């Protein structure tokens, strides 16, 4: 990424195909819209539900298409390896290839060790760590054929401060596991020219989960999820050789492409997001 005062995300990903997990709600919905606005073809991997078409899914597809991208919706539970492989194969058949794998889907609970159920603990490990692994692994053959291949994982910097290690160890483990995989892939696939990075928000992002878990006060000072979408587009638009093996904060990415005024995203409060700071 290089500083460009007039950087504009529109058309930055024109003709490229991005597989996105968890691309319907919250940050995922914003990511889908941002990728579409940048001209990307977006493969939305969604969790199978009784009603295949939900209002949130319709909004996500519309947002991609309104931006100029083509959207392909595929139902695949990240815990089901065969379903994920089938979905990726279908995506390659439809678009002719894959240029980026964006691991966004995540299960979340802030319960501590004594309060969390083993079932909830297993779910976080299966969706967050194993899900990112299975999806990325399935995308690798297509990524090897891309001119600018990226893996981008929504996971935090490895902050070993006791504040974070002790706050909610099960969730912390699941997110740090995603980060370790992402950094490992950068080293493992450096010879293939595949970039792998993490992206995390500097400040809390305004989503339904934030309101539910942290309350209205936290949401009031949170940033719009569009900040993560714009940052993701900037990373994926960068030549893979120039950015890999990094834990990136959204605001640092945006500043690197010349977006210094972050007021458009809101979030003027003093609180940083989870795992950022001591």
Image (cartoon, rainbow, N blue to C red):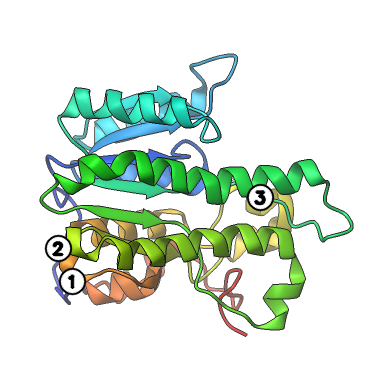
Which quadrant is home to the N terminus? bottom left
Report how far apart the C-alphas of labels 1 and 2 lie in the structure: 6 Å
| Residue 158 position in % (x across, y down) | 53, 74
Name the residue that disc number 3 marks: 108
Label 2 SS: loop
Note whether 164 is above or below 171 in the view shown.
below
Near-viewer residue (89 or 220): 89
Name the residue that disc number 1 marks: 242
Q: Which mark is residue 122?
A: none
Report how far apart the C-alphas of labels 1 and 3 lie in the structure: 32 Å
Residue at 60% x, 43% y: name it.
126
Name the residue that disc number 2 marks: 239
Badges 1 and 3: C-beta atoms under 8 Å apart?
A: no
Instruction: Report if residue 215 is visible in the image.
Output: no
Which quadrant is home to the C terminus? bottom right
Tell whether 161 sits left or right of 245. right
Residue at 41% x, 41% y: name it.
135
| Residue 66 position in % (x across, y down) | 25, 32
Direction right: furthest residue: 114
Label 3 SS: loop
Task: Classify 10 Å Cα crowding around label 2: few (below 14), some (14-19), many (20 and above).
Answer: some
Note whether 256 is above or below 168 in the view shown.
below
| Residue 139 position in % (x across, y down) | 31, 41
Note whether 117 is above or below 66 in the view shown.
below
Badges 1 and 2: C-beta atoms under 8 Å apart?
A: yes
| Residue 85 position in % (x across, y down) | 38, 30
**Closer to the N terminus: mark 2 or mark 3?**
3
Tell whether 130 sits left or right of 138. right
Residue at 26% x, 47% y: name it.
100
Residue at 75% x, 44% y: name it.
120
Near-viewer residue (20 or 151): 151
Near-viewer residue (195 or 66): 195
């Amino acid at each position: 990424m290089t500083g460009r005062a007039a950087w504009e995300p529109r058309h930055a990903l024109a003709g490229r195909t991005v597989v996105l997990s968890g691309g319907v709600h919250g940050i995922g919905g914003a990511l889908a819209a941002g990728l579409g606005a940048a001209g990307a073809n977006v493969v939305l991997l969604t969790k199978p539900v009784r009603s295949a078409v939900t209002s949130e899914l319709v909004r996500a597809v519309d947002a991609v298409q309104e931006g100029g991208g083509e959207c392909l919706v595929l139902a695949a539970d990240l815990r089901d390896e065969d379903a994920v492989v089938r979905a990726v194969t279908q995506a390659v058949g439809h678009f002719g290839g894959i240029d980026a794998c964006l691991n966004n889907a995540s299960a979340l609970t802030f319960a501590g060790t004594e309060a969390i159920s083993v079932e909830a603990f297993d779910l976080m490990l299966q969706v967050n760590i194993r899900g990112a692994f299975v999806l990325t692994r399935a995308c690798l053959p297509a990524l090897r054929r891309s001119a600018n291949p990226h893996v981008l994982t929504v996971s935090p910097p490895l902050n070993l401060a006791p504040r974070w290690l002790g706050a909610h160890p099960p969730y912390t483990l699941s997110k740090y596991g995603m980060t370790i995989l992402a950094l490992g892939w950068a080293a493992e696939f450096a010879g293939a020219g595949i970039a792998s990075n993490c992206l995390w928000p500097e400040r809390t992002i305004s989503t339904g989960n934030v309101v539910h878990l942290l309350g209205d006060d936290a949401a009031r000072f949170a940033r719009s999820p569009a900040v993560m979408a714009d940052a993701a587009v900037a990373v994926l638009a960068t030549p893979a050789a120039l950015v890999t093996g990094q834990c990136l904060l959204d605001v640092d990415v945006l500043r690197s492409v010349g977006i210094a005024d972050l007021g458009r995203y809101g979030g003027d409060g003093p609180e940083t997001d989870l795992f950022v700071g001591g």
